[in-house]
Image (cartoon, rainbow, N blue to C red):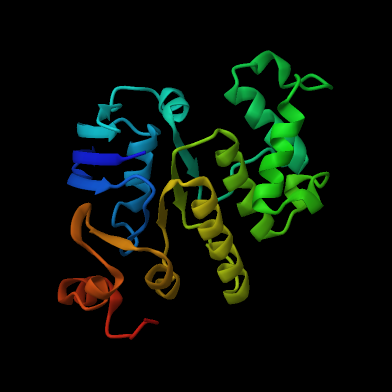
Amino acid sequence: MKLEIRNLTKAFGGLRAIDDVSLAFSSGSLSAIIGPNGAGKSTFFNLICGAFPADAGQVLLDDQDIIRLSKTERMRLGIGRAFQVASCFPTMTVAENLMAAVTAHVGQWSSISRRFPPPGIRERAGEVMELVGLTHVANVEAAILSHGDQKLLDIAIALALEPKVLLLDEPTAGMGPEERWRMIERVRALWGQRKLTLVFIEHDMDIVFQVASTIRVLCYGRVLAEGTPDEIRNNRAVIDSYLGTEVHAA
């Protein structure tokens, strides 16, 4: 599914967090959003998924403008979001979290609290657990999962809603080097298997340059640059404002 952003703007008081941003993400692409803290990256995601109302601009899914739709309506059309801090029910098990997500997705809210889920719900939750590699902790409460597994559960909840566009806000935040790479390889595998249009925010530049085919750089709410990893790595404006002179993996 193609995602296109046109002239998107959002201000908080006198601060323009997102300032006339226009970007296009082709169907099935894997791309990264980078930039310094306060650049507007998470706000950008919040505007796309409908968590914040935009002041101006358009968000188009396959050429349909969804800017006036609610967060729930956008989700039903195919926009999924996983957060920097995992968003799940801490006292519920992994399986229960996913069954709740699937139940809500199919519109059976009244069934969420039932002891026995509607037909097909348990099976669908099992499919998603297997997809992200959480089957071995199916009966573990979310609160006592490892940090990495909590992040995987958050992604799994987003996948349970069958997105066509998946937004990941710092999927490796708070992880050690080895755990980061395991997570990002899992994300890349999910992208390939599900044919998603996947956009991720990330601060680890080695991961960004090795994984993303296209990189967009936000700075003070504006698009500073966009291009291939090589183009961004050698962009003087990006080096001066964000990357510095450190050489990242090619």
Q: State left or right for residue 53 relative to residue 94.
A: left
Looking at the rendering, in which quadrant would you find the C terminus?
Answer: bottom left
Front-most of residues 144 and 72: 72
Foreground residue among 205 and 161: 161
- Residue pictured at 22% horizontal, 33% vertical: 58
**Which residue occupies 30% across, 71% down?**
229
Where residue 95 sits, quadrant-wise, is: top right
Q: Horizontal and vertical percent for residue 152? A: 63, 52
Image quadrant of residue 51? Answer: top left
Residue 140 appears at what percent x and percent y? 81, 47
* Residue 12 in view: no
Give how far across and how far down residue 155 sits, in percent.
Answer: 57, 47
Q: Quadrant of the N terminus?
A: top left
Image coordinates for residue 173, horizontal then vertical, percent: 53, 62
- The relative height of residue 168 versus residue 113 in the rendered view (above or below) is below
Can the viewer see residue 28 in this picture? yes
Instruction: Give 214 or 148, whichever is nearer the viewer.
Output: 214
Q: Is residue 208 left or right of residue 133?
A: left
236 on left or right of 79: left
